[in-house]
Image: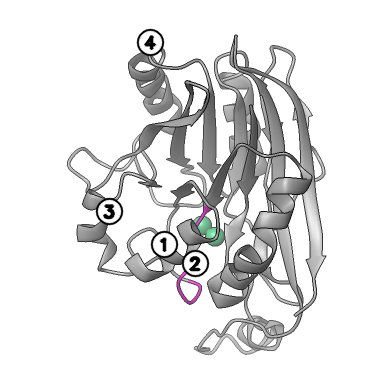
Amino acid sequence: MRVLVVGDVVGKPGRQVLARELGRIVEEYNVDFVIANGENAAGGNGITRSVAEEMFDSGVDVITMGNHVWDKKELVDYIETEPRIIRPANYPPGTPGRGFGIFEVKDGESLAVINLAGRVFMEQLDCPFRCVKEILRQTINSTVNTIVDFHAETTSEKGAMGYWLDGQVSAVCGTHTHVQTADAKILPKGTAFITDLGMTGPANSVLGIDPDLIVEKFVSHMPVRFQLAKGPSQFNGAVIEINSVNGLSCSIESINLPIEV
Ligand SMILES: [Fe+2]
Ligand SMILES: [Fe+2]
């Protein structure tokens, strides 16, 4: 099976890219299933029901989240009713929603999607390394195909997760930094890996935000109200080809497309 994993979708510009371009990309890359990180999909922070529905209508099959998961309060109730939205699994026990799900792809094939959050320079959640092994114990009897969205800040924590899961999952894809890394590869035991998928949203920006505002913040150290950048957009993600007999990956190709407004 071929799975497209899309880097953090930022605000309306990111959603417009999905609405206009996802169908074409799915066709061009012969994709069977689409996972997109939606933690910044609603105005840059969090996600709402209407925004999630818009992403599903554009062709996204599963939405993963990250540290911005609770920025829009309505998700606390909505997430309980929508199994296609996955939040980091290593939040404390009792947190609303699900940290993983198993989804039908095609011809009886299924895929587990797991979302984890890193801890270096981030909130101190439960250990993502132990957490994911516990989840795999639960999913392994249902499917061998597994994609992990590891939402983390540092390249080292994400690289370590790749090797921790090498040979046990189909792919480990990093998200959160909004900057695509040039290291998409198949690890020695057959797991596809990329440190960060990048961002789908405003191209001339700092992580999706108007660069003038970010510069002002760094230079002045005064409070600045962030706004999404205007102008052309970009589509970032990766296509992973999984051998669904053993759940290991044959290839990973990163995608970085400029999108005209
Ligand atoms: Fe993000
Ligand atoms: Fe994030």
Report the amino acid beneath label 3: Ile
Q: Are marks 3 and 1 in contact (CB under 8 Å)?
A: no
The residue at label 3 has a CB less than 8 Å from ligand 2:
no
Q: Is residue 50 positioned above or below 55 on the image?
A: below
Residue occupying image coordinates x 82% and y 66%:
258
Q: Are marks 4 and 3 in contact (CB under 8 Å)?
A: no
Among the 4 quarters of the image, the one containing residue 236: bottom right
Tell me the residue that label 4 is attached to.
Answer: 141
Q: Is residue 101 positioned above or below 205 on the image?
A: above
Q: Secondary structure at mark 2?
A: loop
Q: Which mark is residue 52?
A: 1
Q: Are marks 4 and 2 in contact (CB under 8 Å)?
A: no
Mark 1 packing: few (<14 Cα in 10 Å), some, or many (20+)? many
Pick the front one: 43 or 12:
12
In terms of sequence position, does the residue under pointer 3 or pointer 2 come before the other?
Answer: 2
Among the 4 quarters of the image, the one containing residue 161: top right
Q: Main secondary structure of the magenta part?
A: loop
Q: In the displayed orientation, state which residue is furthest to the front.
A: 107
Residue 234 visible in this rendered orientation of the protein: yes
Distance in Å between CA atoms under marks 3 and 1: 10 Å
Distance in Å between CA atoms under marks 4 and 2: 33 Å
Classify residue 224 as left or right of residue 188: left
Report the magenta residues as a range.
37-44
Among the 4 quarters of the image, the one containing residue 73: bottom left
In terms of sequence position, does the residue under pointer 4 or pointer 2 come before the other?
Answer: 2
